[in-house]
Amino acid sequence: MFGISREQMFSKSRDRNVVDARHLLYYMCSTRPMQLIYIQKFLEEEGFITKHPPLIHGVKVVTSRLKDDPDYNHIIQKLKKSVII
């Protein structure tokens, strides 16, 4: 959806599209519901080391966008439908 590779997703890139994709990943995981420690462990397994505050921030950013932008909710719904459980 963001036109990035798996390698980019789990890189230290701060490009806006990569950061937005990561934030959505954090949000989607947190709504499953996954505890932060398990999200963090998953990211570490993929080579992306982070602490809890960036995860919390990412979830808050997406939550805020959902309130302000109805199109963003459409993106979330589309992603949820495409996720293989």
Image: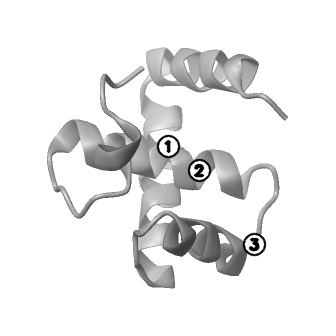
Residue visible at 57% across and 23% down in the picture:
73
| SS class, disc 3 | loop
Please tell me the numbered disc located at residue 35: 3
| SS class, disc 2 | helix
Give the quarter of the image for residue 36.
bottom right
Disc 3 crowd rating (10 Å Cα; few below 14, some 14-19, many 20+) is few
**Residue 70 place in picture, x, y as percent:** 50, 18
**Residue 4 place in picture, x, y as percent:** 30, 31
Give the quarter of the image for residue 41.
bottom right
The kind of residue on which mark 3 rests is Gln
Location of the C terminus by quadrant is top right
Distance from Cα at disc 1 to Cα at disc 2: 5 Å
Report the front residue among 65 and 25: 25
Location of the N terminus by quadrant is top left
Q: Earlier in the sequence, mark 2 or mark 3?
A: 2
- Label 1 belongs to which residue? 24
Please determine whether, in this image, residue 37 is positioned above or below residue 72. below
| SS class, disc 1 | helix
Residue visible at 69% across and 57% down in the picture:
30
Please determine whether, in this image, residue 58 is positioned above or below residue 37. above
Q: Is residue 78 left or right of residue 7?
A: right
- Please report contact status of discs 2 and 3: CB closer than 8 Å, yes or no: no
The kind of residue on which mark 1 rests is Leu
The kind of residue on which mark 2 rests is Tyr
**Residue 66 place in picture, x, y as percent:** 52, 34
- Please report contact status of discs 1 and 2: CB closer than 8 Å, yes or no: yes
Report the front residue among 4 and 21: 4
Residue visible at 41% across and 50% down in the picture:
22
Please determine whether, in this image, residue 78 is positioned above or below residue 13. above
- Label 2 belongs to which residue? 27
Distance from Cα at disc 2 to Cα at disc 3: 11 Å
